[in-house]
Amino acid sequence: MANPSLLILAGDGIGPEVMAEVKKIISWYGDKRGLAFDVSEDLVGGAAYDVHGVPLADATMAKAQEVDAVLLGAVGGPKYDVLDFSVKPERGLLRLRKEMDLYANLRPAQCFDALADFSSLKKDVVAGLDIMIVRELTSGVYFGTPRGITTQPDGSRVGINTQVYTTEEIRRVARSAFELARRRNNKVCSMEKANVMESGILWREEVQWVHDNEYPDVELSHMYADNGAMQLVRRPKQFDVIVTDNLFGDVLSDCAAMLTGSLGMLPSASLGAPMANGRPKAMYEPVHGSAPDIAGQGKANPIACILSFAMALRYSFDQGDEATRLEKAIETVLADGVRTADLMGPEGGQPVSTTEMGDKILAALNASL
Ligand code: NAI
Ligand code: MG
């Protein structure tokens, strides 16, 4: 059987720097675990604009549609701020998400013990935390019509956005959440505001429908999203998988992610419908951007991008044990006190470089054999 295929789009700024460390780890899996990938690379964002005049070439888009998973670094940078909106680096990312129809955005909030002191919350509230927020990514208030800003006859202005969800849009993201829950702790909490929004009522009813008809074995609860925000900060460990709409998910996932520390630690996955081989359409990327303030200086923390690859192992390639091996290697390195600059506490110390962090993780992987 052919090797699974990966398309690497490293992008701009620190994207290529953190992706270089991921590439080492991909090679390690081929050499040491018999897990070889067919890896191809291409351009996205400003890097693509510089060559093609667009942030994502059609040929790259076509390739992304064919591979088993896309690994993306980051896009953007001050050099491209002057560009027209239609060719801005971020548009390359949006095109990938839209044309691959990646409707389920997975954002884990996972607390590595060695970094529990780093959280703004008390250590015992976050230590051992491991939750997954599934955010609907392709519909809702960011896309609904009517939308726009109009001027009334009296000169006052009106800004309009509309939250629109269809049965199928809710059901498919609910299925993603229930599937995940079965691989984790079999528990889903769905969040909306059914008390004040009709789209929230539909959301609650459809999630319940998917549960009752297809996943009755998974424990399902419903919560108003504002209460969800409070609960996430008060007692986050009560949750396992949370599923919510695009807008609430945007806010709640950022909030949950920060429970655990640095932007340099946060991975994500965006999944779509299953392909012919049963794997979901998928793109994996760190949550952070291109970090122009530290780009080119070897300071970037590669862990967010490496953890994104761990998610690929788990969710695209059914290699949950190998994903856990990689996460444990990271935990070991952090427990040894190895820190990139973004993970330095007030007590200070000597930070390691991007490459050194990658090498330490490789060493821990070797030690795991
Ligand atoms: P950013 O995430 O690039 O940086 C925010 C802050 O976090 C900076 O101080 C940066 O140095 C730090 N940081 C981020 N990742 C880090 C890492 N791995 N290790 C250590 N420190 C890290 O967000 P910002 O500054 O708002 O945006 C910079 C550029 O990135 C903009 O052009 C923006 O449009 C783009 N961007 C791209 C995203 C993507 O590709 N998915 C997401 C967010 C922003
Ligand atoms: Mg956000």
Image (tube, rainbow, N blue to C red):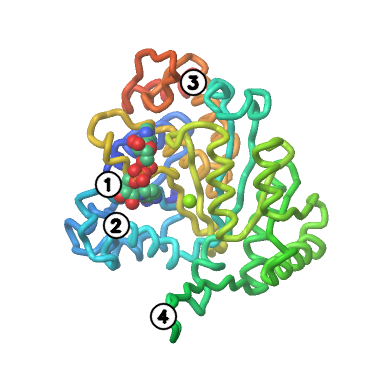
What residue type is disc 3 on?
Leu
Residue topped by disc 4: 155
What residue type is disc 2 on?
Pro
Considering the numbered disc 3 on the image, is that residue within a helix, a strand or a loop?
helix
Which numbered dot is residue 258?
none
- Residue, x 51% and y 78% (percent of image)? 145
Residue topped by disc 2: 89
> How far is the residue under mark 4 from the one under mark 1?
43 Å
Examine the rendering and report whether any part of residue 341 can be seen: yes
Residue topped by disc 3: 334
- Front tag of 4 and 3: 4
| 299 versus 319 height, above or below | above
Q: Earlier in the sequence, mark 4 or mark 2?
A: 2
| 8 versus 62 height, above or below | above
Examine the rendering and report whether any part of residue 40 can be seen: no
What residue type is disc 4 on?
Gly
Q: Neighbour class for label 2 at 10 Å: few (<14), some, many (≥20)? A: many
Q: Earlier in the sequence, mark 1 or mark 3?
A: 1
> How far is the residue under mark 1 from the one under mark 3?
27 Å
Give the percent coordinates (x, y) of residue 158.
47, 75
> How far is the residue under mark 4 from the one under mark 3?
58 Å
Considering the numbered disc 4 on the image, is that residue within a helix, a strand or a loop?
loop
Give the percent coordinates (x, y) of residue 68.
46, 54
Who is closer to the viewer here, 131 or 262?
A: 262
- Considering every residue shown, the one lying at the far left of the view is 51
Who is closer to the viewer here, 141 or 69?
A: 141
Which numbered dot is residue 12?
1
> How far is the residue under mark 3 from the one under mark 2?
33 Å
- Considering every residue shown, the one lying at the far front of the view is 154
**Is the residue under label 3 in contact with that under label 4 (CB below 8 Å)?**
no
